[in-house]
Each structure stands twice: as C-alpha cells, then as structure tokens.
Image (cartoon, rainbow, N blue to C red):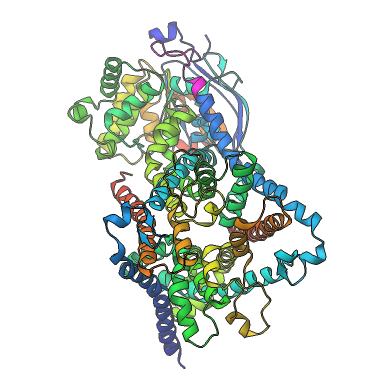
Amino acid sequence: MTRQQTQRLAQWLISATAVIVILPIVLVVVYVVAKGIGAINWEFLTQPPRNGMTEGGIFPALLGTIILTLGTAVAAIPLAVGAAIYLAEYAGDNRFTRAIRLAIVNLAGIPSIVYGLFGLGMFVLFFNFGTSILAGALTLGLMTLPVVISTAEEAILTVPQEFRVVSFSLGASRWQTIRHQVLPHALPGIITGIILGLGRAAGETAPILFTVAAFYLPELPKSIFDQTMALPYHLYVIATQVPGMPLSIQYGTALVLLFIVLSFTLVATVIRTVMRRRREW
Amino acid sequence: MTAKLSIQNLSFTYADGAQALRQINMDIQANELFVLFGPSRAGKTTLLRLLNRLADLLEGTERTGEVLINGRDIYAPNVDVTQLRRRVGMVFAVPTPLPGSIYSNLAYSLQMAGIRDHHTIAERVERSLRQAALWDEVKDRLQDSAFALSGGQKQRMCLARSLALEPEIILLDNPTSGLDPISTAMVEDSLFQLKQQYTIIMVPHSVQQASRVADRAAFLLNGELVEVGSQQQLFMHPHDKRTEDYVTGRFG
Amino acid sequence: MSTFDEAPVSWQEPQKDAPPARRNWSELIIETLIRLAGISAVVIITLIFLFLLKEGAPAFMQVPITNLLSTRWYPIEDMFGLIPLLVGSLLVTIGAVAIAVPLGLTTAVYLGEFAPPWQREILKPVIEVLAAIPSIVLGFLGWVALAPLIQGAGAPTGLTAFTGAIILAYMSLPTIISITEDALYAVPREYRDGALALGATQWQTIWRVTLPAARSGIVIAVMLGVGRAIGETMAVMLVTGNAANIPQFGLGAFFQPVRTMTATIAAEMGEVAQGSVHYSVLFAIGIVLFLITFLVNSLATRFIGGSARRRGGQI
C-alpha cells in the first residue's frame, strides 16, 4: 500500500467510526420520540397513574422531579458558586488549594449510587430527615456540586484579569471587584454550569433510590419531609417491576424525562452562545 | 519640607527569583511631574505598581524597603489598601475601559468609595472629563459603551477615571503608547494642567516625551536607579555616562 | 503652591464625603462564607467516606474475611462473597473500555483533524446530548430494544455483560472524546506543521506525531472513562441480567448474565433491615467503589499535574 492509499483508508475508517458513534445517539433520541409521542397527551401529564399504574398519567412523578430539581438548586447553587469564587479569586497556589481541587475531582468521580448510600447514612438516618424530599434534594445537591464548581470557576477565570486590576487600582476592595467586575461578566457561564448540573440531577435515579423516591404514592407530597415519586425512578419501576405494563406508557415516560433533561442542555447551550456573541471585549 | 512621596531602600523580587528593583531611593515633591525612564526591563512599571500596592496582587514576590506618602509608610500593617489606592490613581499603558457606559466607568470609583449622591457623582464625572479634555467629545453620549470610543478617547477616559476620586498622586504607565501624535499631544497638554492640582509620576513613551514633559526625572537601568535630577540636568548635562548614552540614543 | 500642599490630607483618612468604612462588616461576612464554601469540597468528601465507614465497617467485623472473599453471593444464607460482584463489574467495565476507547479516540481525531467546521458545529452538540441522556433512559432502551437484538443474534439471553458494556461504552464516550480532543488540541501546531513540511501525509502525522504527543491526555481520558463505567448503576442494573455468579472464563464470559457491585447495592438496599449484616455489607461494597474511583481519579489528576509540570519546564 502506498502512503497515499494508507492515508485514504485511514481517513475513510476514521470517518466511518465517527458515524458509528454519532448515529446511535441520533437513533436513540428519534426512537424514543417515535415510540413515546403517541402516549403524550394532556391527561398523561396531569393525571396520576391508575389501575396498578397500567393506565393514567405520570403527574406525581413529574411534579416530584420538578420539586427535587428545585431543591437541588437551592442546596447546590450557593455552595458551588461560593466554592468557585474561592478557587478563582481567593485560593493561593499551595497544598491546601491542591487538596480542594483533588477533592472536587474525586467528588465528580464518586458513583451516584455511593452518593445514594451517603445520603441514606447522613441525611435519612443520622439527621433523621427520613426518606424525604429534603434528604433527596441534599443528596442530589452534593452530587451536583463538582460540575457546577468546575464550570463556574472556568466562567470566572475567563473574565479578563485587567478588569480586576483596573478595579483594584480604582480603590475597589476585593469583594467589590468580584461583585461588580467579575460576577456580572461570569454570570452567563455560571448559569450555564448550574443548568447543566441541574439537568443531570433531574435525570438521576441512583441517588434518590434510598433517600426520597417512592414506588407509588396515592397523594402528592405536602412538605419537604414527605416522600415523592420521581420520573427516573418511575421509569425504572414501570419498566421492570410492574407486570403487564403497556409499552407505550413506558416510552412516553422515557420521552418526558428525555425531553426535560435535553431542554436543560438546550437552554444552557443557547445562553452560552447568545452571551458569547453579546460580549464586548 | 517632607517630600510628597519618598522611596527608601526599595527592592523587589518576583516569584521566579528575578530581581526587578534594587535599593531604590528617591523623593518626589508635590505638584511636580516626575518621569521614570529607562530601557525595557529597567523596573519602571514595577516601581509604579509598588506605589499604589498593585504589586500586592502578585503572589510569591518579595519586597524590602519603604514607600512613604506624606511621611507615612504605605506598607505599614495597619494601612487600608483600598484607601491608599483611592489617593493614588493609576492609568495603564493599554487603555482599559471596564464593560459598561462611559458614565459608569467614571462613576465606578466613586460608587465603590461609598458615594451614593447622584448629584455629587454627576458633578465629579463632568469635572474629571473636563480635566482630561474629553468632556466636549463625549458629553452627549455618556451612556454609550466605553468600548465604542477611539483609542485616544479611551485613554483620556481612563485618565479622567483615575481623577474622579481626586487623588493626590497619579501614576501614569506609558499612557500614550499606541496613540497617534494628536492624541498624544492632547494627553500631554492635560498633564500640564493637572499638575497644578496633582502630583504626577509617569513612565514616558520615549526619551523625547520624557524631556518634553518632565519637571524632574529618574533614569533606571536593570532595576537600579542610575540618576535623579531636573529635566535640565538629566537631559542636557547628565552626570552619569550611562544616562548620557541613553538620552543621546546610543542604546536602548 | 496649591492648597493641597499646605494642608496635606492624609490618605489614610476616608474621603470627606464618603461614609466611613461601613462596608467592612458585610464584606468580612461574605468573604468568610466564600472561604467556607471553598473548603466544603474537602469536608464533603471526608464526610462521605466517614459515613460509608460508619455504616459499612461492621461488615468487616461481623463477616469473616474468608466469607467476603468467597465466590458465593447469597445473602439469605449469609454468604457474602464479593468476588462475583467484582468480576461482574470488571467484565462490564473492561468490555465498555474495549469498545469506547477505540471509538472515542477515533472520533476525537476525526473532530480535531478531519471534520470541517460545519460538521464540528453539529457533532459536538450531538455528543453533548449523549452526555445528557439519563442512564435510566439508556438502560430502559437497552432493556426493551437492545437486549432482544442481542438475544436474536444467538445468545442464550439478551441480558449479558456485553449488553451492559455497549450501553456503558456510549455513556463513557462523551468523557473520553472531550478529554482526548483537549489533549490533541494542546499539541503544539509546530509539531504537526513540521511533520507535514517533511512530506508526511496527514495520517502519518497523526499516527507518528500528534497521538504520541497527546499520550498523557489520552491516558487520562481512558482512566476517567473507566471511573465513569465502573460506577454506573441504573443502566447496568437493567441490562446485565443480575446473576451473581462467576461466568466461565474465556470470551464467552461476556455473553453471560453478570451482576455488578453498583447494581447489587441498588437492587438490595431497599429490602434489607437497617443495621443488619447484609445492610453493612452493601455499605462495604460502597466503600470498595469509593476507593476504586478515588484511586482512579487521583491517579488521573496526578497525570494531569505531571504533564503540566513537564510542559512548564520546557518553556
């Protein structure tokens, strides 16, 4: 084989592999939409399941996922943004900072089921919150921390250093500089990170298995100390635990979950793109 | 009479071990336009950034010696650095507008100092823009983005911005780099006005500019102070051979 | 002489029309909170480990080590052999890595070296979509769509280690692709230009110059992919058949049902009595998972630090 032939073969193979990677992704989305769209209607989204979950809708699970995602936001955002500000603006280059970074990398790597165990041990049992929205949201919040910290820190670091220097030279304190010259410009990036993190949390099953998720509840939760149903767990339940479950309901549930999670990604991408275009510097 | 600003045995080393300044001693009097000149890497910018403690932002550096303003050491432990920087303004070599309008750029230091009264702020904004000879050009578009200004206008806005708080000392780090001759002349003209009220310490764009604007000057070389003197002495009759070589263009 | 000179205002005194240092208290509080948030990551990871220990340590005291290291996982009869679960996790992970690494590397090379900009604009969001799809959705599809396919291809059951490996491979791909892409991007332009100038084809340049130069980044990508795969729970639980026995050795092992550590915790925690031996053993499995991923991620981080230091040294 000549070098040119090798080159052509390599290029062909590499392009083919890219197709092998991309095509199934597109297929998965199209397949779920095609199979699930028939189940989606107003009743499906607004009614509770009926008749041993083989009929009716998914409203309690949908509501539960929305509540849990909001709770995750409350739990994660202040801590994550604070940590990102600390790392980007305060932390020196020393062993302590390296320890923090190592901890963040490892938090990101801990399996979600281990977060579930931790949530069970600490929030459900030790703090005695019980299996509750509070315990579940805190667990999801901690799991979301590393993603949000990393993206927020990156966003803060893209703000040009000269803005800080100028601000300091004009007699602004460190916090004033952060508050007025750094955070406003980093905000789109920080929000993007938050949305991506929340999208991930909304789709997670393992962390909520033992901390909040209920198989089936006849009533909606009344307080943060109640259990709730949630879409990802609901999908698991109806796919594997309920005999005689109509496939259309399963696909419909998968579609709603996929739609929610992908909207998070879409919104984040749009914010990022728009803000990049609008940037002055 | 004590000097407005007195630098005593000042040495500075960067984190990588490079010594930027060695045992600098000099006095700067009130209301003079004092020029720090010398070839690149002489330590001019470093020295300037030590005078408002902007060099504090760098990690791992080492400083010895003192800087006294009105007889008080700005590196003393009880000094509030933000207060210091409000009294010692600075203009950078590259015009650096903050994102936002021209007005918000000018008002920023005032607001950060806790001044809330809109009247006072508007008044100070106008006066500083007049002092920097920019008012007539921008008075009708104060709410426009500061990035929309031309290079020369941006730099005069930065000068005005450093004046808004009425500091006592203004540090100018090569404020006319990259400006056309007309803009340069406008900046230089405003400096002659400004020294009535302020003490100005400036790193010039060139030896020519140094000799044009300086009341007194200091020649720095490789982090050492070679010679301090009046404009007459330093540019016409330098004592030191190295100063003479530099001002006559034999190196640099 | 100006008035300034005659009446020197000390710069330590606040501006005449500015309120005196009123901001300091609130700033102090805010900065303290920021510092606390800064150390939270260290606190949280320590807490996670401590709580796993608290609940899981009794397992190591109550269950003889020979039992834990045996090959039978049959909790009803107090048989807590972790080996089948470890083997299950390993099989699925190895399978996933074997599929994901070649696919991920070539896709990254395609994106970085061959794809025209308009294709990159389309392909990168598609890969982001993959990263966003919840594992339960992929697991669900594996369960209702992929498993029947594999069974149809002649396997005794569709729920096998191989099925899990395929799903896991796709879940690891976004990580592997994006980190490899960064690593390729970090290879200095001059290396490539030099090789091309010497008459090498594009492929030769990639194979002989770019890939070797990006080696450490690629290793990190693979390690993080492994970390992602070994910890994945829901998808694996749905598609691997959950049989806690050690499959026969050989390639056929991939086509038998297995049960992973993660799936075991997820499936059984709901049914155990709190504080029972079984409960503690499930937490002990959590400790094992924690330690494995901690090791993998810390090593990867060390690699990142190492390569950065080397680069710094050259300049």
User: On the picture, is A120 further left or further right than B179?
Assistant: right
Along the line of sight, which residue is nearer the eye, A109 or A105? A109
Q: Is residue B31 above or below residue A27?
A: above
Q: Is residue C298 above or below residue A73?
A: below
Image location (x, y in percent) of residue B115: 36, 17
Q: Is residue B159 visible?
A: yes
Q: Is residue A153 above or below residue B212?
A: below
- As drawn, the residue found furthest toward the left would be B140
The residue that appears at 33% across and 64% down in the rendered structure is C121
User: On the picture, is B113 further left or further right than C172?
Assistant: left
Which contiguous range is marked in magenta?
C13-26
Q: Is residue C151 magenta?
A: no
Q: Main secondary structure of the magenta part?
A: loop
**Toward which corner of the image does residue A51 lie, by quadrant?**
bottom left
Along the line of sight, which residue is nearer the eye, C263 or B129? C263
Image location (x, y in percent) of residue C18: 40, 14
- As drawn, the residue found furthest toward the front would be A51
Along the line of sight, which residue is nearer the eye, A85 or C282? C282
Image location (x, y in percent) of residue C47: 65, 44
The residue that appears at 33% across and 44% down in the rendered structure is A281
Q: Is residue B235 visible?
A: no
**Toward which corner of the image does residue B168 lie, by quadrant?**
top left
The residue that appears at 32% across and 54% down in the rendered structure is A45
Q: Is residue C23 magenta?
A: yes
User: On the picture, is B177 further left or further right than C98?
Assistant: left
Along the line of sight, which residue is nearer the eye, C177 or C9? C177
